[in-house]
Image: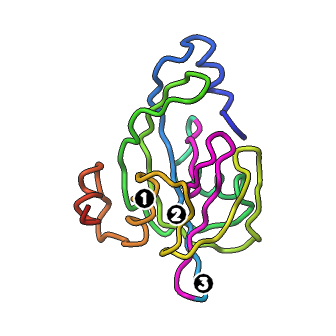
Amino acid sequence: MPTPDFILELRKHIGNALLWLPGTTAVVLRPGPRGDQVLCVKRSDNGAWTPICGIVEPGEDPHLAAVREAKEEAGVEIEIERLVWVSPTGLMQYDNGDQNDYLDHTYRARWVSGEAHVGDDESVEVGWFDLDALPKPMSEIQRRRIGVAVGNPPEVLLGVQAAKDFLGD
């Protein structure tokens, strides 16, 4: 599902004005031949690679949104291991002029079952990648989300600076 209906309805009233929305990211890991691999999707709108990301629906728990998004986007069942990071994404402006900023909830998750495949029109490619061979292009914030989830900090990181400090960048 591309843009949720509740956002389309809001856009009828506010146009392209900035929306502050809850977001979710599932960094899905599975064992691979050379260590852990991460599931990534190539977005259809801009060609960028990301972990599983999405918008939390009204009344939906963010961790359940991550599970739902993994099924919708990549056809896989996942289990959330834990919340690892909460931070704003910063302003995102889309080709149609819409502006959003998300409060992202990044989860470390593990693959349970299902053959990864393109599950909807939000992506054009899906794949498992070794951690030392992430696909390009991928934004720095997405690489950071993967790094935090893989690093599995002892406590939930709060804010962008906490993740930078944890990752040493």
Disc assigned to residue 32: 3
Q: Which residue was labeled with disc 1?
A: 145
Q: Is residue 144 above or below residue 94?
A: below
Q: Which residue was labeled with disc 2?
A: 27
Q: Secondary structure at mark 2?
A: strand
Badge 2 or badge 1: first in the primary sequence: 2
Furthest residue in direction bottom, as rendered: 33
In the image, residue 110 lies at what x, y percent? 57, 72
Q: Is residue 96 above or below residue 13?
A: below
Badge 2 or badge 3: first in the primary sequence: 2
Decide: few, some or many residues near mark 3? Use Cα within 10 Å; few <14, some 14-19, many ≥20: few
Q: Is residue 65 highlighted in magenta?
A: no
Decide: few, some or many residues near mark 2? Use Cα within 10 Å; few <14, some 14-19, many ≥20: many
Q: Is residue 39 highlighted in magenta?
A: yes
Q: Nearer the viewer, mark 2 or mark 3?
A: 3
In the image, residue 89 lies at what x, y percent? 41, 42
Amino acid identity at mark 2: Val
Amino acid identity at mark 1: Arg
Snapshot quadrant of residue 146: bottom left
